[in-house]
Amino acid sequence: MSIDVRTPAERDAILADPGFGRHVTDHMVVADWSSTGGWTVPRVTPYGPLTLQPSAAVLHYSQEIFEGLKAYRHADGGIHLFRPERNARRFAASARMLALPELAEQDFLDAVAALLRADHAWVPDGTGERSLYLRPFTVATEPFLGVRAAAEATFAVIGGPAGAYFPGGVTGIGLWVSTEHSRAAPGGTGAAKCGGNYAAGLAAQAEAKARGCDQVLFLDATEHRWLEEAGTMNVVVVTADGTLATPPLGTILDGVTRHSVLTLAPEHGLVPVERPIAIDEVLRGCADGSVTEVFAVGTAAVVTPVTSLVHAGVTTTVGDGAPGPHALAIREHLTDIQYGRAADVHGWMRRVV
Ligand SMILES: *Cc1c(COP(=O)(O)O)cnc(C)c1O
């Protein structure tokens, strides 16, 4: 990744086909923390390397948390965030779970806004579902090999343009239901957005790919029976009797998209329910028609239809094997709100620039 400020022409070439996670903007916001001095005032600086000691705690014990949210440009040129207070609150909750210093929610929001003001030209217009993806994170920087909560940390916000997740139209994915791996256990860090959870899930994700699936679907750690979530997205099941069901919070991430989809469900004729969902119920339901749709939800892809599930070597088709109508309608509804094409009746959008 380049750390030189790009010319407007170079930036426009990147924004024409940004992909995801390949490019960063020109600036970042950084604040340092120590147990004695607290936080420094967050500063906007040119994007560039962080300097860490090889003994920095994060490199050894994964004391790290992050967030992910998008900035959307509306037709009038304004730049808006979607429910960023929930990211700020979750970031503080993740900090507590990882024994990292908490950043005040307003300071989190101000830091994100500061980066957007500095790099507003990097927010693409909304055609083709483009956006600017923002990645706030905190890492333990104290140079100390003992095992305890670090006394020094760095918070930063970086960002990069993101293109349409489904450039050729929304397609379904296949999930490999792991009966061996677990993502989280009660009392663990499943509800934190932390790098360690991802590191621990990569082998399962690789196994899903090796078996011809797109992602892994994790079950509970005790019985390997109850749905938890996909590696990076929450999961939702639509039943023929008109419910939109999703597993309860606890060992899964409290997704902003999950919460938004539960809130919008009644507007789509579905009763939202948070309840334990057994994998055998889902597989049987796909076979007898009582489960009509399964989809995964998260900021990056919004709504991703799940069209097949592979469990214990058996492939089950969801619905007729094509993206379901509720998945597509809820996806469109959410993106219409995010891009300012639909009325924001829930008061979710925050204009920043
Ligand atoms: C970020 C994330 C999600 C989705 O959360 P959103 O707030 O909707 O983006 C779901 N599961 C995991 C494990 C995540 O890290």
Image: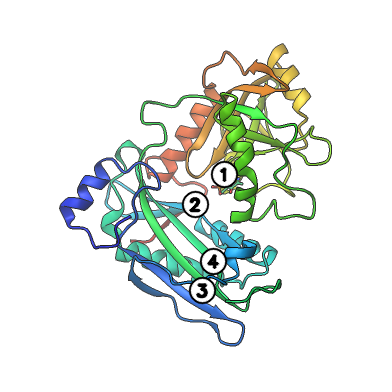
Question: Which amino acid does the dot numbered 4 rest on?
Answer: Thr
Identify the mark nearer the N-term, 1 or 4: 4
Name the residue rendered at 72%, 24% in the picture: 282
Q: Secondary structure at mark 3?
A: loop
Query: Which quadrant is the N terminus positioned in?
Result: bottom left
Identify the mark nearer the N-term, 2 or 4: 4
Q: Secondary structure at mark 1?
A: helix
Does label 2 point to a residue whose CB lies under 8 Å from ligand 1? no
* Residue 336 occupies quadrant: top left
Q: Which residue is mark 1?
A: 260
Q: Residues within 10 Å of mark 3 (few under 14, many from 20)?
A: few
Q: Calculate the distance from the C-alpha at mark 2 to the C-alpha at mark 4.
A: 25 Å
Q: Which residue is mark 2?
A: 348
Q: Which residue is mark 3?
A: 53
- In this rendering, the answer to whether 319 lies above or below 114 is above
Q: Which residue is mark 4?
A: 138
Question: Which amino acid does the dot numbered 1 rest on?
Answer: Ser
Name the residue rendered at 62%, 61% in the picture: 62
Identify the mark nearer the N-term, 2 or 3: 3
Q: Calculate the distance from the C-alpha at mark 1 to the C-alpha at mark 2.
A: 9 Å
